[in-house]
């Protein structure tokens, strides 16, 4: 569904975005042309280390919670042709502050995004991550979309694994960069500035609650997996969520995003808290039950002491809810003396 550009819903979303917190680094943008009303219609920003020039999108498509909520938080629902999201993300929608926007914007697919979905929707711009939406094996890449005159933007969090010159930024800085760039691309710079400033302010306030003595709490992220746990390396959002909360991801040395590892390094790391990611087909309570049943984990402090923190999928993937995830985790860590 395509909606009128200045609907009351969009204005309300803009006010909500201003009240939430954001993030952003000044990455600079070059205005290339200007409309009659004085607003720029073409702008150049840096995406994954490459300068890309965009004409202001009118029929954007976003993939997954990350893409949809970066758009919604900036009040851009009315600029969207739709979003694509696996049904695993449905509980994250139910708990989202932008639940209303999800209801008003067309859901174009319930699994992975494809080039066919985008073309059929007559999209002019697509937002997704590399290997979490875009991918050579999936037949949808920025280069392939360009051939059919569809622009695209790659989540900065995934740039470490994209292109020739890998871009290495922390996940929260990547989030700030995306919000800043989207603000410029869609002409809502002030809204983006307010959102980012708010998010940074909340992170700074959270740091003031950290314990003044001792090492940070050791935290392990469990998404899924039996023989090998699927977890977060240093390029995935939970790495910075944990750091902002005052802890340390025990696998922050992994030069990966979301990835699988063996149980041995987890046991060796002796995490004090396990963050369990909650989504549709694998409820957190079932995952916790499984973790408690593993003989190898019985000596791990988090399991011995029953210290499991449940995090919504919507808080755990790159997006404006990352700061809420950090605040909630920080409160939990303080509650157990960490």
Image (cartoon, rainbow, N blue to C red):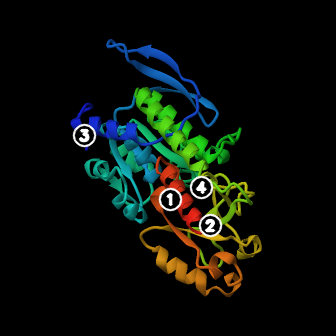
Q: From the image, tell me which residue sits under label 2.
A: 337
Q: Earlier in the sequence, mark 3 or mark 4?
A: 3
Label 1 vs 4, first from the N-terminus: 4
| Residue that label 4 marks | 245
- Which of the two marks, 3 or 2, is nearer to us in this view? 2
Of 315 and 89, nearer the camera is: 315
Q: Is residue 271 above or below residue 211?
A: below
* Crowd around label 3: few <14 · some 14–19 · many ≥20 (10 Å): some
* Residue designated by label 3: 9
- Residue depth check, mark 1 versus mark 2: number of the one nearer the observer: 2
Which of disc 2 and disc 3 is earlier in sequence? 3
Residue at image mark 1: 328
First reached walking from the N terminus: tag 2 or tag 4: 4
Mark 2–mark 4 contact, CB under 8 Å? no
Label 2, residues with CA under 10 Å away: few <14, some 14-19, many ≥20:
few
**Left or right, residue 44 beside residue 256:** left
**Relative horizontal placement of residue 141, taking residue 192 as reference (left or right):** right
**Mark 1 or mark 2: which comes first in sequence?**
1
């Amino acid at each position: 569904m395509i909606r009128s550009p200045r609907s009351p819903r969009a204005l309300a979303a803009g006010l909500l975005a201003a009240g939430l917190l954001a993030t952003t680094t000044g990455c600079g943008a070059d205005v290339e042309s200007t409309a009659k009303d004085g607003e720029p219609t073409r702008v150049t920003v840096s995406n994954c280390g490459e300068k890309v020039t965009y004409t202001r999108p009118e029929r954007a498509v976003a993939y997954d919670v990350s893409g949809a909520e970066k758009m919604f938080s900036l009040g851009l629902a009315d600029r969207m042709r739709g979003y694509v999201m696996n049904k695993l993300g449905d509980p994250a929608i139910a708990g989202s502050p932008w639940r209303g926007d999800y209801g008003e914007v067309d859901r174009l697919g319930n699994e992975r995004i494809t080039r066919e979905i985008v073309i059929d929707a007559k999209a002019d711009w697509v937002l997704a991550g590399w290997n979490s939406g875009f991918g050579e094996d999936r037949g949808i890449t920025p280069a392939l979309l360009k051939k059919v005159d569809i622009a695209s933007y790659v989540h900065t969090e995934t740039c470490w694994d994209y292109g020739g010159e890998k871009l290495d930024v922390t996940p929260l800085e990547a989030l700030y960069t995306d919000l800043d760039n989207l603000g410029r691309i869609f002409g809502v710079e002030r809204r983006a500035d307010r959102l980012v400033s708010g998010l940074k302010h909340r992170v700074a306030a959270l740091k003031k609650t950290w314990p003044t003595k001792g090492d940070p709490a050791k935290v392990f992220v469990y998404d899924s997996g039996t023989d090998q746990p699927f977890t977060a390396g240093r390029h995935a959002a939970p790495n910075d969520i944990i750091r902002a909360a005052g802890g340390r991801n025990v696998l922050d040395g992994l030069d990966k995003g979301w990835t699988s590892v063996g149980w041995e390094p987890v046991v060796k790391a002796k995490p004090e808290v396990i963050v369990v990611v909650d989504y549709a087909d694998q409820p957190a309570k079932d995952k916790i039950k499984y973790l408690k049943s593993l003989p190898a984990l019985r000596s791990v402090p988090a399991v011995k002491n029953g210290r499991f923190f449940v995090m919504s999928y919507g808080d755990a993937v790159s997006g404006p809810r990352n700061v809420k995830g950090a605040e909630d985790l920080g409160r939990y860590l303080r509650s157990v003396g960490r």
